């Protein structure tokens, strides 16, 4: 009985911790160079002139994607809902299946390459996962570091405190955004033969 109670308490604690979101900065404290909210409903933000982020696109989000002239949609989910929802739309669909608990530098490299390709073709990019929080957050943080030359600390602060819904359980993402991984991704991007 005692072991069962301890197990239930542990499971309950872990479950609740997985749903906890990192505290966000108030709008007044939020730096102006962080993402600009377009739609709270879809966690849809403009990150830069040509990079946007959101949760899983639905039919309701399509008009906004067209309004902002999105060309390429990068899906970081293991499931490819974009193939159904966006199949008859004029978007270039890129699918990079990532599991949040196992995200690694190779995943982020694939995403950086997709962004780099879109930028080379002057295309606007939407990056999304299911909630637009964790996988998307890690990808946007690496984008900020690689393409906008932000420090790791600045990018992580935006990822966690920007109001995008980053979940505190994903400690592995903190370790992923390291100087060694940043340098490795930069080297891979500068050598297209790899």
Image: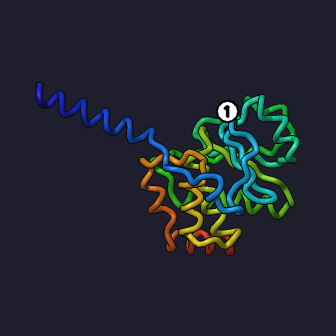
The residue positioned 85% from the left and 35% from the top of the image is 63
Looking at the image, which residue sits at the far top?
A: 1
Which one is nearer the viewer's eye here, 31 or 3?
31
Query: Would you identify the image quadrant in which residue 5 lies?
Result: top left
Compared to residue 107, the image places residue 190 above or below, namely below
Q: Residues within 10 Å of mark 1 (few under 14, many from 20)?
A: some
Task: State the residue at coordinates (77%, 34%).
Answer: 61
Compared with residue 143, is residue 69 higher up or lower down, i.e. above or below?
above
For residue 85, what is the image quadrant?
top right
Q: Is residue 87 left or right of residue 95?
A: right
In the rendered view, does 160 fall on the left or right side of 111?
A: left
**In which quadrant will I find the C terminus?**
bottom right
Residue annotated with mark 1:
81
Image position of 151 with respect to 64: above or below: below
Residue in front for this viewpoint, 147 or 162: 162
Q: Quadrant of the N terminus?
A: top left
């Amino acid at each position: 009985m005692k072991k069962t109670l301890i197990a239930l308490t542990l499971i309950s604690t872990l479950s609740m911790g997985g749903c906890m979101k990192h505290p966000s900065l108030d709008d007044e404290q939020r730096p102006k160079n962080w993402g600009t909210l377009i739609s709270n409903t879809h966690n849809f933000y403009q990150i830069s002139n040509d990079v946007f982020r959101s949760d899983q696109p639905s039919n309701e989000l399509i008009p906004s994607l067209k309004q902002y002239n999105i060309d390429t949609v990068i899906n970081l989910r293991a499931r490819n809902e974009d193939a159904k929802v966006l199949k008859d739309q004029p978007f270039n669909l890129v699918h990079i299946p990532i599991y949040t608990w196992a995200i690694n530098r190779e995943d982020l490299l694939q995403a950086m390459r997709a962004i780099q390709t879109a930028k080379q073709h002057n295309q606007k990019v939407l990056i999304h996962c299911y909630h637009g929080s964790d996988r998307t957050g890690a990808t946007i943080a690496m984008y900020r570091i690689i393409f906008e030359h932000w420090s790791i600390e600045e990018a992580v602060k935006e990822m966690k405190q920007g109001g995008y819904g980053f979940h505190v359980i994903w400690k592995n993402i903190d370790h992923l955004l390291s100087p060694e991984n940043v340098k490795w991704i930069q080297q891979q991007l500068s050598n297209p033969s790899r």
